[in-house]
Image (cartoon, grey):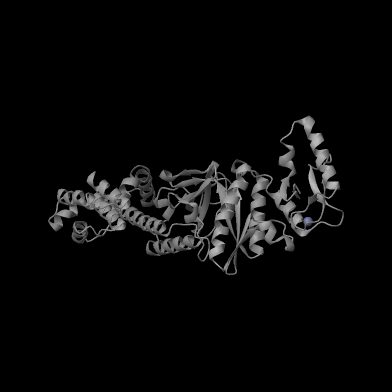
Amino acid sequence: MDVALYEGEILNITAEISRYSEVEKERMIDKYRKAAEKKAMLCPYCHEELRLRAGEIRDIHFAHLKGMSCQESEAYDTYHKQTKRENKKHSVIKEIIYNELKGQELIRPDLKVEYGYKEKAEEKWKHYPDIYLNKNGREFAVSVITNVHEIGDEKFVKTINKRNKYFTDKGLESIWFVEDRELADDYEHRVLHLWEAEYGLAIKTEEDYKWDELLKELREQFPGYTIPRLFGYRAHGPMNHDVRSLYYVHSIGDEITFSVYRLILDQMRSPFRAFALTKGYRMNISQALIVRDEILLSDKDQEDGNRLEFANRVLYQIEALEAADAVRRESNETRNEQQAREEYLASIAQETLEEVAEAHFTVEIDVVEYISKLKYLSLSPQESEALFYFLKLHRRELEDYGLTLLDVKKWVRYALGKINDPKIRMWLVEIEDL
Ligand SMILES: [Zn+2]
């Protein structure tokens, strides 16, 4: 292993030696070797003495005396070998996640957080997650994957699959965080371009099950339609409607944020890709990693909103298709109905999807009540947002209430003069600009 306890502190010999020039290296290695012989280097785990080895075959490392090796140092070595392919950011990201979760451990008695290799050293696992999590008996393997550009590499695909299976066999649920470097999403075409290994890194969380339910309902309601097709997604072949999520981690210095993408994996062949159910959204570390029944990894309100929007888009697309069919029937088109439908779909899917969805996104509020709340300065931030969308999308309906946009703006200006809450103000300013 590359670490030892020296004068009460952890000494990483690889990092230490790399500080010196080639000439000095030999001298420093010799210095530390002598110190080790005089029992100055201890195993950080079992506190037995270590020797320094700097042979030709293996890199410089510390080793226990013959036959004295301890389980934790062996686990450390296994883990170290496993993470060798990762880049520098890996350990930084891992430590930030570990510290965040460890902080929650203090206030949640049913939560246990530990480094994977430490937790499972005794059981001599073949693969260790970066972080082991136990929430009331439910166990999770949390791992960070960097160097995603290598991910197309066949060997790495196998490794990921092996680790997934290994953790599952051990009763753990895997959570992967993928470095964002190679994230390739194209929401306009509803596609997420993937490396092959990302199939193995797509996980199933509570929110994905909710998405499954929504898709099941929509399929039952509209049995004649293929949902990804409705969005213009060109699938390799029939898709299994199993919603999964990919979590990307973005790091700038010591700061990290996460983003989540809900998707349906396409058939596993090149080019590897998935149908994107949502656009993906960012979360800060405390949002993403808050632990309730599991690591939440999502923003519940955002997810509910995304599902509503998705369902609305499906409904709209189907209505549009049916209207187009009716027109065609009237004009006595002889073309194959299916083909015509597909062509129509392709033509609208790319250009107008965004506009169409916006027009169809329904906001139902009691506008009179909202205006009165505005007068009494009791409108909540959520209500201000809803009011904004109502005015943006359904402004014509104001007439039904005997109101005009100018009337509303008058009260908005009045409220802006009295309300300090920045969230409310943001939406009111948006309304002023309408
Ligand atoms: Zn030891």
Left or right, 210 with respect to 81, comes to left
Left or right, 47 with respect to 169, comes to right
Name which residue lies at 70% across and 52% down.
79
Quarter of the image for residue 189 reads top left
Q: Position of residue 177 (x, y in %)?
A: 56, 51
Q: Where is residue 327 in the image (x, y as percent from the top left)?
A: 26, 51
State the residue in front, 335 or 197. 197
Q: Position of residue 4 (x, y in %)?
A: 75, 49
State the residue in front, 366 or 153. 366
Q: Position of residue 237 (x, y in %)?
A: 51, 51
Above or below: residue 278 compared with residue 169 = above
**Residue found farthest to the left:** 402
State the residue in front, 242 or 31. 31
Whether residue 127 is visible: yes
Query: On the rendered image, what quadrant is the C terminus found in?
Result: top left
Total marks in image: 0
State the residue in front, 168 or 99. 99
Quadrant assignment for ligand 1: bottom right
Whether residue 81 is visible: no
Quarter of the image for residue 118 reads bottom right
